Image (cartoon, rainbow, N blue to C red):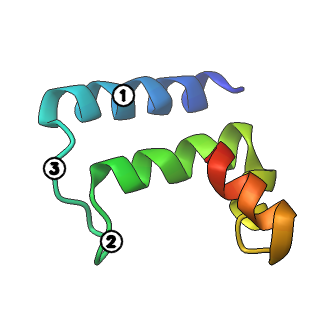
């Protein structure tokens, strides 16, 4: 990860802690925990983002893992 990326992550984490889970986002229908989950999954477990949309056992397994 670049220094700029690490700085951005640190600033986001500080904002999340400061503002709390009820903080609004600019995304309609998303709260702060939704945004945090999305960013964490996108960065570390992207297969779970797609996997939970799959039908059957694979989709259920990915949904539980999320």
Q: Nearer the viewer, residue 15 or 4?
A: 15
Left/right placement of residue 14 relative to residue 37 reads left
Relative depth, front residue between 56 and 49: 56
Q: Is residue 24 above or below residue 18?
A: below
Q: Which of the 4 image quarters holds residue 52?
A: bottom right
Front one among 46 and 7:
46
Residue at which label 1 appears: 13
Q: Are marks 3 and 2 in contact (CB under 8 Å)?
A: no
Disc 3 crowd rating (10 Å Cα; few below 14, some 14-19, many 20+) is some
User: What residue do we see at 27% from left, 59% from top?
Assistant: 31
What separation in Å lies between label 1 and label 3 (alpha carbons)?
13 Å
x, y percent for residue 28: 29, 78
Q: Secondary structure at mark 2?
A: loop
| Labelled pair 2, 1 in contact (Cβ < 8 Å) | no
Query: In this rendering, is residue 63 above or below 21?
Result: below
Q: Residue at x 34, y 48 (%)?
A: 33
Q: Position of residue 46 (x, y in %)?
A: 75, 51
Secondary structure beneath label 1: helix
**Horizontal relation, residue 18 to residue 12: left or right:** left
Q: Quadrant of residue 18?
A: top left
Q: Which residue is mark 2?
A: 27
Rendered location of residue 21, percent (x, y): 21, 42
> Which residue is disc 3 drawn over?
23
**Tag 3 secondary structure:** loop
Residue 1 percent location from the top left of the image: 72, 26
Q: Residues within 10 Å of mark 1 (few under 14, many from 20)?
A: few
- Kindly indicate whether the residue at mark 3 contacts the one at mark 1 (C-beta within 8 angstroms): no
Numbered circle sitting on residue 44 = none
Give the vertical position of 34 relative to 57 (above or below): above
How far apart are labels 2 and 1 at the CA level? Answer: 18 Å
Q: CA distance from mark 3 to mark 2?
A: 12 Å
């Amino acid at each position: 990860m670049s220094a700029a990326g690490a700085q951005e992550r640190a600033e986001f984490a500080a904002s999340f802690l400061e503002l709390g889970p009820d903080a609004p986002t600019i995304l309609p229908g998303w709260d702060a925990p939704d945004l945090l989950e999305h960013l964490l999954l996108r960065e570390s477990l992207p297969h779970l983002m797609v996997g939970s949309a799959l039908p059957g056992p694979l989709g259920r397994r990915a949904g539980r893992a999320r």
